[in-house]
Image (spheres, helix red, strand yellow):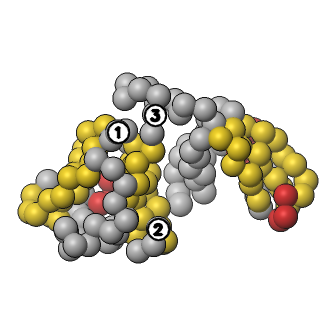
Amino acid sequence: MGKITVYEDWGFQGRCYECSSDCPNLQPYVSRCNSIRVDSSCWMLYERPNYQGHQYFLWRGDYPNYQQWMGLNDSVHPCHTIPYMSLSSTRLISHRIKLYERHGYGGLVSELTEDCSCMHDHFQLNELHSLHMLEGWWVLCEMPNYQGW
């Protein structure tokens, strides 16, 4: 079980809301989100209702303003926890994913079971067009070293 606290103002000020499980809509509790404290687990936050818009992956730590989690604005609606084997571990319980270079699961690239900081270096490919999540939770980033969208 995780714990996250969302604050309306920068620097952990203003109205706040504490979550220890998935929350499909933060708007009834806070009108905006300018700072966040993640006490345990990892969390995925979404910019728009119904788990849409930009996604923000946050792990344990303090985020005194939305730019520190690469947020584009102060809008955060749903949040959802990503479970771990233990709170001190950064390794997921069990994880596997198949990546494909073409739409419709064509041209199998590889199956991953571990973290990879740069898909291009690992597979010599610029783009992936489909994937099949077999186990666990995955976050894919636009740029190397966990940067971008």
Looking at the rendered image, the disc whose residue lies closer to the viewer, 3 or 1, is: 1
Residue that mark 1 sits on? 1
Residue that mark 3 sits on? 84
Any part of residue 105 in sight:
yes
From the viewer's side, name the closer residue of 45 and 83. 83
Q: Horizontal and vertical percent for residue 83?
A: 45, 39
Instruction: Pick out the residue farthest to the right.
Output: 107
Which amino acid type is marked by label 1? Answer: Met
The reply, left or right, for residue 149 in relation to residue 61 is right
Q: What kind of element bears circle 3?
A: loop
| Residue 134 occupies quadrant | top right
Q: Is residue 39 above or below residue 99?
A: above
Which amino acid type is marked by label 2? Answer: Tyr
**Marker disc for residue 51:** 2
Q: Horizontal and vertical percent for residue 109?
A: 84, 46
Give the mark nearest the N terminus, 2 or 3: 2
Give the mark nearest the N terminus, 1 or 2: 1
